[in-house]
Structures are given as structure tokens and as C-alpha cells.
Image (spheres, rainbow, N blue to C red):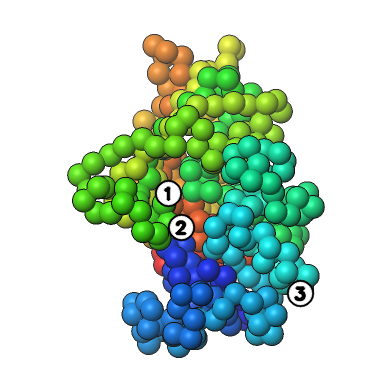
């Protein structure tokens, strides 16, 4: 089978490194370009010695020049860039015939006004928003397969949206009562020098941040509103915890009048039971990040509290995996008609 010539733009950050790990080992991918302004000219294995003696790891980092990337023959590019930066190069690569899987926030929202409200500046490419497909494979698989531009979801949104969408579609929950509490490893903040993220500030400590209006709320509410068929506004409280990677989320919502708590497990099983990367743990089971880190799985458990009439949904994922790099590779597999699990089984 012909290997897919692939580029990673912004390959030296935490998500970029995860994409390198996955794509260097992917049986149907040939990595032909990896960009980094800081590491230009250095081999992947020199910057990341863990890749030494891995086939393809002698590839040198290059500058993120669209013409140079296209000249490598790349058919698809992953963009692991900050929001506001990704849109410009996405447009340039699309114009040169590449498919684009963007891991920034630039194309996740349908509304340019909502983007400006949450990200603090006008959208850099509003004309592309209608074309972009929100890249949650378990929800939008067919659309992703036909897409030219995929907006890969954020890490927190993945952990919140996946458990809720089937239940909102089945009209089991009161949307106005949804509250989501998430805890994430420090790698979720990105590879940057920030006093609040150094070891002595994070170790043996936990704290909330980004309240009451974390940027990820915009895409969470967008996708939940689509599922519920009405505008949904939720409370979302993210927390930083002293681990490298992993997200655990607990979401609660009131059961609708007339809805049965037993339907929660049945609906989740009907929607996700046969899906490769959703592991349903059943009623009363609490997911653990140690079981999902370095995988593309999301583990989901649930319970019902009859005292408060609230459903409690629990999920765990790797913020660099199912919340970022490996979920984006899942989209690549869909776009190119590969096995859904190609390159993603316990890597």
C-alpha cells in the first residue's frame, strides 16, 4: 500500500512530539516534513533522542514555509500551532492542494464572532469556517472522511462532549443543569516558559484556573447545543494537577422528568459499544488516567444519584493523545480510508 506523505507543522512542542511518535511508527505514513523555527536544520533524533534509530528520525526540521512543505510532496499536514497562527498557514497549504488537520482552535467554531469573544481578536480566516469539520471521529466520522480541513477538538472538550452528546440527543438530561469539572496534567498548558508551570509551582499542588470562562467553553457549548437542538450554557471548571499528562472529567446534570436512569447506560452502549476507542466501564466505575495515558482511548463510567436526581458522568483520556495528537491521527485514518486503528493500538 502506498504510504501517505505527511507533514507536521510545529513539531517541536508537546503535541508535535506526540504526533512525531505516532507518525514515525504509523505503517501507512511517510513523514516528509517537520517544521520548527527554533530547531531548523537539526535532525528529529537530535532534538528528541528517544527517536534515535527509528526509521525516518534522521529527517531535519525545516522552516514552516508553505512552498517548501508542498515541494516535499506532502498530501496532508498536521498543524500543531498556537491559535491565530495556524489559520494563515492552513490557507496556504489548502491552496497548494494539501489536506489540513489543524490542532489549534482556529477552525473549531462555526461563528467568527464567538471566536473573537473567547480568543480576543478577529478570526484570521472566517471564510474557511463553514468548510471546516469539527474533528470528533465518534460524532462526525463521515464528514471527516470527506473533509479537506479538519478542526481537531480540544482536550477538555473531548472529555466532556463525548459522554454528553448521546444523552442530550436522547433527551435524557436537562441541558441547563450541566456542570463539568476537569483536571489536567501540566503538558496541557503547552511547551513554554511560564513561572506558574515550573516544577516547584505545580508539584504537590492543585488549583483551578481559567474560571469562569475558559476558552474551551466556546466549542463545548457549540457541540452540546447541536446535540441538544437548543442553546446550551454550562459551568466548566478546569484544574491543573501535578502529573505530566492525562485528563479526568466529572460532569453532572439533572435527569429529565420522565427519563429513566437505566437508559443512561443503554444509550451509551448503543452509540459507543462498537467503537474502537471508547471504553465503557459501566455503572459505578470511575475511570483512571493511568489506564489511558499514551493511548487513544477515552474511558467512560457513570452513576446516578437518586437523592439529587443527578446523573454523574466520568471520563478519562490522555490530553496529548485522545485530546490532541492521536485523535488527529484517527482523523487521518478516516480521510485516507485506512483501518480506524492503524498506528493507534497501544503506541
**Quarter holding the N terminus?**
bottom right
- Vertical placement of residue 138 versus 30, above or below: above
According to the picture, the residue beneath numbered tag 3 turns out to be 96
**Mark count:** 3
Left or right of residue 36: residue 122: right
In front: 103, or 29? 103
- Vertical placement of residue 83 versus 101, above or below: above
Asked if residue 227 can be seen in this view, the reply is: no
- Vertical placement of residue 74 versus 160, above or below: below
According to the picture, the residue beneath numbered tag 1 turns out to be 317
User: Who's the residue at 54% across and 40% down the image?
Assistant: 215
**Residue 171, image quadrant:** top right
Q: Distance between the residues labelled 3 and 1?
A: 35 Å
Q: How crowded is mark 3: few (under 14 residues within 10 Å), some or many (20 or more)?
A: some
User: Who's the residue at 43% across and 22% down the image?
Assistant: 304
Residue 86 numbered mark, or none? none
In front: 151, or 267? 151
Of badges 2 and 3, the one in the foreground is 3
Q: Which comes sooner in the sequence, label 2 or label 3? A: 3
Residue 321 numbered mark, or none? 2
The reply to whether the C-beta atoms of the residues labelled 1 and 2 are less than 8 Å apart is yes
Q: Distance between the residues labelled 1 and 2?
A: 7 Å
Asked if residue 8 can be seen in this view, the reply is: yes
Coordinates of residue 34 in the picture (x, y in percent): 54, 77
Which element type, helix, strand or loop, lies under badge 2? Answer: loop
**Quarter holding the C terminus?**
bottom left
Amino acid at each position: 500500500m502506498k504510504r501517505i506523505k505527511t507533514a507536521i507543522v510545529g513539531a517541536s512542542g508537546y503535541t508535535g512530539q506526540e504526533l512525531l511518535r505516532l507518525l514515525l511508527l504509523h505503517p501507512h505514513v511517510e513523514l516528509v516534513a517537520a517544521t520548527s523555527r527554533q530547531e531548523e536544520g537539526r535532525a528529529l533524533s537530535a532534538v528528541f533522542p528517544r527517536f534515535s534509530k527509528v526509521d525516518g528520525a534522521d529527517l531535519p526540521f525545516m522552516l514552516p514555509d508553505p512552498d517548501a512543505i508542498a515541494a516535499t510532496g506532502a498530501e496532508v499536514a498536521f498543524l500543531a500551532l498556537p491559535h491565530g497562527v495556524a489559520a494563515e498557514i492552513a490557507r496556504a497549504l489548502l491552496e497548494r492542494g494539501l489536506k489540513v488537520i489543524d490542532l489549534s482552535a482556529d477552525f473549531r467554531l462555526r461563528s467568527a464572532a464567538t471566536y473573537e469573544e473567547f480568543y480576543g481578536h478577529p478570526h484570521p480566516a472566517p471564510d474557511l469556517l463553514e468548510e471546516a469539520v469539527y474533528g470528533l471521529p465518534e460524532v462526525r466520522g463521515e464528514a471527516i472522511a470527506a473533509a479537506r480541513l479538519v478542526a481537531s477538538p480540544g482536550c477538555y472538550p473531548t472529555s466532556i462532549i463525548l459522554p454528553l452528546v448521546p444523552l442530550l440527543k436522547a433527551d435524557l438530561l436537562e441541558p441547563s443543569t450541566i456542570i463539568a469539572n476537569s483536571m489536567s496534567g501540566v503538558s496541557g498548558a503547552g511547551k513554554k516558559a511560564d513561572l506558574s508551570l515550573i516544577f516547584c509551582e505545580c508539584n504537590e499542588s492543585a488549583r483551578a484556573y481559567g474560571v469562569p470562562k475558559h476558552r474551551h467553553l466556546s466549542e463545548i457549548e457549540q457541540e452540546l447545543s447541536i446535540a441538544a437542538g437548543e442553546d446550551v450554557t454550562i459551568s466548566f471548571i478546569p484544574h491543573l494537577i501535578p502529573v505530566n499528562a492525562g485528563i479526568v472529567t466529572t460532569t453532572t446534570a439533572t435527569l429529565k422528568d420522565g427519563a429513566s436512569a437505566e437508559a443512561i447506560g443503554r444509550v451509551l452502549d448503543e452509540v459507543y459499544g462498537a467503537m474502537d476507542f471508547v471504553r465503557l466501564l459501566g455503572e459505578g466505575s470511575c475511570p483512571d488516567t493511568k489506564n489511558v495515558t499514551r493511548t487513544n482511548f477515552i474511558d467512560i463510567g457513570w452513576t446516578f444519584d437518586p437523592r439529587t436526581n443527578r446523573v454523574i458522568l466520568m471520563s478519562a483520556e490522555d490530553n496529548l493523545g485522545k485530546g490532541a495528537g492521536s485523535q488527529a491521527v484517527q482523523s487521518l485514518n478516516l480521510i485516507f480510508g485506512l483501518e480506524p486503528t492503524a498506528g493507534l493500538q497501544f503506541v
